[in-house]
Amino acid sequence: MKQADISIQSKLAQRSFDVSVYGDAGRAVIAFPSEDGCSTSWENGGMVEALRERIEAGELQLFCTESMDAQTWLARGAVDDYRLRNLEQWQGYVEKELLPYAARHSASKELPLVAGASIGALNATALMLRQPKRLGGLLAMSGSYDARAFAGADPDQAWLDVSPVDIVRTLANDAKGMKALAGKQLAFVCGRSSDELGLGSQRGLDALCCELGLEASFEYWGWDVVPSWFWWQEEARQLLPCLLAPNGLIDRKLVARLASARTEAEHAADQSEAAAVELREASEALKQAKSELRAARKRTRDEAESVEAAAQKDEELSVAAAEAWAERDRIALLLAEATKAAGAAQSAADAAAERLGSARWIAGEAEAAVERASQAQADATARLASAKEAVAAAQGEAERLAAALAEVQAEVDAERDEARRLKSGKTSRSKSKRS
């Protein structure tokens, strides 16, 4: 299988886009990537390998382009002007640069097909509705076709202009648009699992097409079919060949209806079997419940008797409790009085202890005074003895001094007598001379 990786320099988007081309013959298929936005998205997801036989047989040629989904549909945090401007540039690149490139490099003269999975299905469907005259058919897998899923519940008109369900709704007043889509092979497919977030929008698109009489194929695979490369590979293997053949979807729709009916029948059978199992289980549960009810009624009677006995016992215990509470109140009163007496006794004990402490302190002071008095008495006795000794010594000294004084007095008296005698003798001699 021939493969080429090229880059288209877009003047409209003012950037380059990678494009991976698989095969060199067959009808051109413009393939849009899933959320990763890479030109190798289909190869990485196993889609190229799943279609290898068709590609190598020269039945189809894949042109897998890079996208701007991260700046448009998926840029929920950005302002609308930014997202819508990028979306306009992206769609301009696809319509005015990618489609002409594929037309120039495709060996087939038939109008190209367009295909995509998940967000790629949204891009593929929008392109088909905008350029029906330039495309031959559509394969949309697990897509979400309402712009409200990306722009909020109340989007501006600019979002509605690129929203597939809203574009289809306007076809009611667009005869040219309906004519351009007439005869185009349009295939939509998804599973029925809860993971198929676009299931509701596919059903809405299905209802609109039926209402307008727009021929399209809508397939709803099993409840185990989830949006994944595994299932997209199988869906592409089955549906792309139908798009390659003229009116290929007509037979497919009959087969699809049969398969859908079979799936519904199998699902109904499974649900019926499950319901039967549930019914059997419910019957068994009912029997068990009846048995338990009888046992419960018996227990109820037994419990009623037990309750009556318990009520009588409770009455007896209530009387005993009342008496016990009365006794408790009496004892509480006695306890309160005893507590009061104990408090008074404690107060008296505290006062006695305080007086005892004071007495002990006074006794201590008295003992100290006695010791000081005893010491003073001893000191006084010693001083008295010393004084007696001093008195005795003084008396002895006085007696000695008195004796000495007497001797001195005697001497003085003797000297006086001698002096008088001498004086008397002089006087007599004087008188004798005068005479």
Image (cartoon, grey):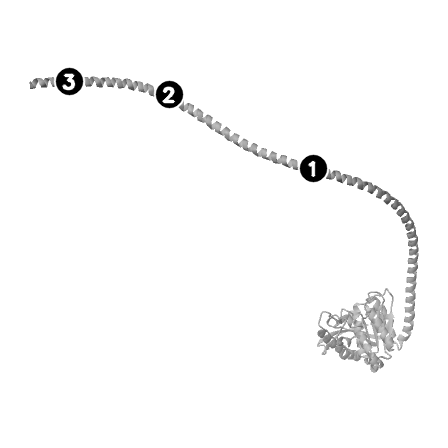
Q: Quadrant of residue 163?
A: bottom right
Residue 187 position in % (x across, y down): 85, 73
Instruction: Measure the alpha-carbon separation of dots 2 and 1.
Output: 78 Å
SS for dot 2: helix
Q: Residue at x 18, y 17 (%)?
A: 418
Residue situated furthest bottom in the rendering? 176
* Residue 389, disc: 2
SS for dot 3: helix
**Of 35 and 207, the residue lying toward us:** 207
Foreground disc of the pair 1, 3: 1
Q: Which residue is mark 1?
A: 335
Instruction: Measure the alpha-carbon separation of dots 1 and 3.
Output: 123 Å
Crowding at mark 3 (Cα within 10 Å: few <14, some 14-19, many 20+): few
User: Do residues under tags 2 and 3 come within 8 Å of each other at their CB atoms?
Assistant: no
Locate the N terminus by quadrant.
bottom right
**Of 25 and 420, the residue lying toward us:** 420
Q: Residue at x 90, y 49 (%)?
A: 297
Vertical placement of residue 16 versus 409, above or below: below
Crowding at mark 2 (Cα within 10 Å: few <14, some 14-19, many 20+): few
**Amino acid at pointer 3:** Leu
Q: Which residue is mark 3?
A: 422
Crowding at mark 1 (Cα within 10 Å: few <14, some 14-19, many 20+): few
